[in-house]
Image (cartoon, rainbow, N blue to C red):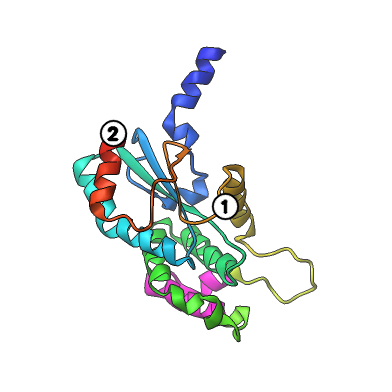
Amino acid sequence: MRMQRVSAISNNSFVMALAPQFAGHRLGSISAPHTLEVYLDYVCPFSAKIYKRIREQVWPFVEQTYPNKVQFIFRQQIQPWHATSTLVHEAALAVEKLDESKFYPFSDILFAHQQEFFDEAVETKSRRELIAELAKLAESVGVPSDKFTELIANGTGEPKNHGNSISNDLKLAIKLGRQNGIHVSPTALFDGLQDNSVSSGWELDQWKEFFKSKL
């Protein structure tokens, strides 16, 4: 029994598992022996900074230098003190549900347009208006706006507080962050352990040193 438990814990793909509906959150091979996870919020400026660096510089470097050695997992960190955090994360999950290959292209678009969803920018807008704006962004990456809207609309019938078709997936993302003691974004984990040395201000050379020390 002890040997079986050790084996399970040492199996990286088991520890850093993704629910099937979140398969689009992964970059790289599921069988890669090491995992970098970063908890990100679409309306956090620091998340945008580290995400852009990873997407444009760090991940291409990792793929070229350490092929099949590392997988990257985007962990969604919903931060309710930002007025639209819940909605934009619902939007990303809706896009993934419709086409998992569009999760990262849509995330790219969301971060590029994040200021349009900052607190001050949405103060006078309704949820319906914001959904319409997000639907246009979804359409720009090839996701049908009508199907997207259907998934995240809460409905207008008898008030039951049931949420929408994405609510259960959103709850899973929130539970994972809480379970792992994640409080802010961005927060990075390597092979399941939180690494507070990782900074959104890192340049590529600092990331290179990071991976050199880990691999």
Where does the image place residue 155, in percent across and percent down from the top left?
A: 69, 73
Q: Position of residue 85 (x, y in %)?
A: 56, 67
Residue appearing at x 40%, y 46% in the figure: 197
Residue with the most extreme left position: 64
| Residue 142 seen anywhere in this rendered image of the structure | no
Please provide percent x and percent y for residue 207: 28, 48
Q: Give the mark count.
A: 2
Quadrant position of the C terminus in the picture: top left
84 relative to 198, above or below: below
Q: Which residue is mark 1?
A: 183
Front one among 40 and 95: 40
Residue at position x 48%, y 39% in the image: 17
Work out whether mark 1 precedes mark 2 in sequence or the reverse, and give the earlier one: 1
User: What main secondary structure does the magenta stretch of the protein show?
Assistant: helix
Say if 48 sits above or below 66 in the image: below
* Relative depth, front residue between 204 and 162: 204
Choose between 58 and 32: the one closer to the eye.
Answer: 58
The CA distance from mark 1 to mark 2 is 27 Å
**Picture quadrant of residue 54:** bottom left
Q: Secondary structure at mark 2?
A: loop
- Give the number of the disc on residue 215: 2
The answer to whether any part of residue 44 appears in the image is yes
Quarter of the image for residue 180 reads top right
Q: Position of residue 67 (x, y in %)?
A: 23, 40
Start and end of the magenta stretch?
Answer: 130-150
